[in-house]
Image (spheres, rainbow, N blue to C red):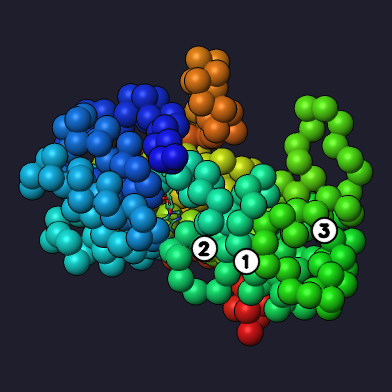
Amino acid sequence: MATPAHVPVLLVPLLAHVSPVSGIWLDGTFGAGGYSAGLIAAGADHVIGVDRDPAAAAAGQALAQAHPGKFTFIDGEFGDLAEIAADFSDEPLSGVVLDIGVSSMQIDQADRGFSFAKPGPLDMRMAQSGPSAADLVNGADEAALADILFQFGEERASRRIARAIVAARAIEPIKTTEALAEIVSKCLPRPKPGQIHPATRSFQALRIAVNDELGQLAKGLVGAEMALAPGGLLAVVTFHSLEDRMVKRFMAGGADDGTQVNRYAPAGIEQAPRWEKVTRKAVTADDAECAANPRARSARLRVARRTTAAAKLVSAASLGAPGLNLDEVWA
Ligand SMILES: C[S@@+](CC[C@H](N)C(=O)[O-])C[C@H]1O[C@@H](n2cnc3c(N)ncnc32)[C@H](O)[C@@H]1O
């Protein structure tokens, strides 16, 4: 059976906040191309669609054929978006959109290993290359696993689960989504009707670690700041609180609402605001969109406009990302 296509989330409010659309836009999370197609229809002169999943290339080629000269697909990471934009054009970007997370195609395909509800290999790699979730679960030490589960999944039973993983893999390697889901489920109370599956937080945490999702987000935000023209727009849709907090801090940290001023700094060194908020608070999906597409329930959209102030490097940690050094985990 063919995998159902990804239904774009919050596309209507996103386009409403960034219109009128013109110039060169970069869609850092191409997926099935819903945002890119929406931007072309709204008037973008050209859209660069980036995705790290090679499976997204076919939809990218189809969109390029349907709109000759208007669309280019790049197999890459949005963490490199400033470099991608500079390679592609001498002109700064008019807009950047990011729709963070996994696509329906990725989550619904059992053999990609993203879902505790679908039996498959314990993979979770968006790029289909590099170390997998099985490598992490079978290779990382117990303390590192507990930190990942706690910090990226906000899993309170992180130590218990890490201990159970280490005990299970001493008998045989944990290779499948079912095996991991069972180990995690045994560590937690049976869920009451309406509660989430016990493995939800652990799977989210491992996916974030395998794909360095928070590191990519921080680099992508800074990259957008470097690549956008003054007046250019950045629109970001996130699906959980860790990411939304980073986007909120990034936009507020550079915006002229008083939050960027360090009151202990000597007078005269405050930076000019680098961003102007377009959305005062996060935009969420309305009842009709949530009813039609349950994925939309947790989505939050934030939009900001670039000023003329010089770009600044900020770290993931300064945006509130957990201070977990993934290089050490993989070492
Ligand atoms: C939620 S889907 C985007 C759906 C898209 N907006 C649409 O309308 O079809 C997220 C996509 O972003 C990709 N992705 C996630 N992180 C990425 C990164 N750091 N660099 C490039 N692509 C990434 C995933 O592979 C996935 O295809």
Mark toward the viewer: 1 or 3:
3
Image-quadrant location for residue 43: top left
Q: Please name the amino acid that badge 3 sits on.
A: Ile
Image-quadrant location for residue 19: top left
Q: Are the two marked residues, 2 and 1, in contact with CB atoms closer than 8 angstroms?
A: yes
**Mark 3 neighbour class, 10 Å CA radius: few under 14, some 14 to 19, many 20 or more:** some
Task: Locate residue 146 relative to residue 300 in the image: left or right.
Answer: right
Residue 330 in the image: above or below residue 285: below
Which residue has dot 2 on it? 125
The location of residue 119, given as percent across then percent down, is 64, 52
Residue at left 43%, top 36%? 4
The location of residue 179, given as percent across then percent down, is 75, 59
Which residue is outermost to the bottom? 331
Which mark is drawn over residue 133?
A: 1
* Marks 1 and 3, the one that precedes in the sequence: 1
Residue at left 39%, top 58%? 53
Q: CA distance from mark 2 to mark 1?
A: 7 Å
The location of residue 64, given as percent across then percent down, is 16, 47
Q: Check disc 2 and report its element: helix, strand or loop.
A: loop
Q: Check disc 1 and report its element: helix, strand or loop.
A: helix
Q: CA distance from mark 1 to mark 3?
A: 15 Å
Q: CA distance from mark 2 to mark 3?
A: 21 Å
Which residue has dot 3 on it? 183
